[in-house]
Image (cartoon, rainbow, N blue to C red):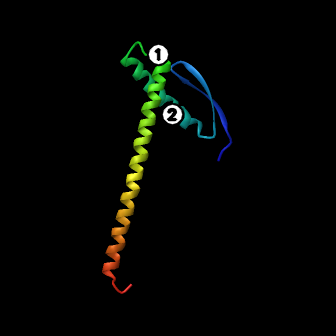
Amino acid sequence: MSLPTTLEVVICGRKYTIKTDKDPEYVKKLASRLEVMVEKIKTGNSRVTFDKALVVACFYLLDENELLKEQIKELGKEIKRLEEGAKLLITNKNPST
């Protein structure tokens, strides 16, 4: 694990200081993605404030995260099912083992 780095990111003209042990370019990429989401939300409704757009963007990201976790869980189950099937095939081909 690398030492924490402090860097500044700008989201919709607002500066944020971030302390992270992640690659600074990765963090800047995340900030850029968040900025695009916030701007898209604000563009869809001119009355939406930055804070509200930021909260909505967070909900989108949390929802995406939960869906991906569920997909990973389902893929894990499928892998186990396939492994069990492969073991049965191997066992049936070699009944003496």
- Which residue is rendered at x = 49% and y = 29% of the image? 32
Q: Which of marks 2 and 1 is nearer the N terminus?
A: 2
Residue 8 at least partly seen: yes
27 left or right of 68?
Answer: right
User: What is the x, y in percent for residue 61?
Assistant: 45, 34
Question: Could you tell me which residue is drawn at 55 percent across and 23 percent down?
Answer: 10
Amino acid type of disc 1? Thr
Position of residue 68 measured from the top left corner of the image (x, y, whole percent): 41, 44
Q: Give the foreground label among 2 and 1.
A: 1
Residue in the picture at 39% in, 13% down: 46
Report how far apart the C-alphas of labels 2 and 1 lie in the structure.
21 Å
- Say which of 31 and 96 sits in front: 96
Q: Which element type, helix, strand or loop, lies under badge 1?
A: loop
Is 69 in front, or is 19?
69
In the rendered view, tell whether residue 75 sits above or below residue 15: below
Q: What residue type is labelled 2?
A: Leu
- Which SS class for mark 2? helix
Give the residue at the far right of this rendering. Answer: 3
Query: Which residue is identified by label 1?
Result: 49
Q: Mark 2 points at which residue?
A: 30
- Proximity of marks 2 and 1: CB atoms separated by less than 8 Å: no
